[in-house]
Amino acid sequence: MAMASGAPPAPLPVVGQQFCAPYVVPLTVTKKSLSLSDGDFAITDANGAVVLKVKGAIFSIRSRRTILDGGGMPLLTMQEKAFSMHHRWQVFRGDSTNAGDLLFTVKTTSLIQFKTEMDVFLAGNTAQQVCDFKIKGSYFDRSCVFYLGDSNNMVAQMSRKLTVSNVLLGRDTFSVTVFPHVDYVFIASLVVILDEVHRDKRDE
């Protein structure tokens, strides 16, 4: 029996089914300049409640970030793959970096990028010939779109959020709209990796 064209898509759980809502999930991502104690990012919901926090390993050879839920429980660990030609990040479940806990890999599509373009491969996609998700846009403008596979089917989008307080306080804040049935923790992790890749570019 064919699915009706207006029927909602099947959930896309990458981290977990519980993170796939049947409605649009608006998130606000606030990047902090001083982050030695309380994390690099705060990710809040439409009511301003902190739903995710990001903490990083300071002074490590390989960049490493952990996404925590609002209660401080580790959900994902993101680690840059050392000595890789392309920027490549591996993302694991919880606070693990064991190969058996690998969920997905993110890599830039080319060494020189004037526009943002990154491919996402789920752990089961070992050949990595065709991506499972794709990110396109301009991170410097904080304007990126997240697509399902190598298609035009959008699963989330990101844009800069300008407010008077953000400008006065020098905070880098942006809005992320996660589409229905899409894993919002997965999308949040991609935003963090985007920032890391472009932070590396600024340091070069």
Image: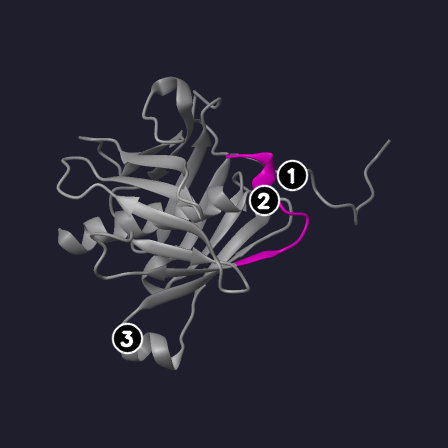
- Magenta run includes residue 182: no
Where, quadrant-wise, is the N terminus in this rendering? top right
Q: Which residue is mark 3?
A: 169
Q: Amino acid at mark 3?
A: Leu
From mark 3 to mark 1, how far is it between C-alphas? 38 Å
Q: Amino acid at mark 2?
A: Val
From mark 3 to mark 2, how far is it between C-alphas? 32 Å
Q: Which residue is mark 1?
A: 11
The magenta segment is 15-26
Q: Amino acid at mark 1?
A: Pro
Q: Which residue is mark 2?
A: 182
Write the residue at 35% across / 19% down: 99
User: Label 3 neighbourhood size at 10 Å, few (<14), some (14-19), many (20+)?
Assistant: few
Write the residue at 45% across / 64% down: 159
Q: Secondary structure at mark 2?
A: loop
**Which callout, 3 or 1, points to the residue nearer the camera?**
3
For the residues labelled 3 and 2, say whether their Cβ atoms are less than 8 Å apart: no
Whole-percent x, y for residue 195 in the image:
31, 52
From mark 2 to mark 1, how far is it between C-alphas? 6 Å
Write the residue at 59% across / 44% down: 182
Would you identify the image quadrant in which residue 82 lies?
Answer: top left
Whole-percent x, y for residue 111 in the image:
25, 42
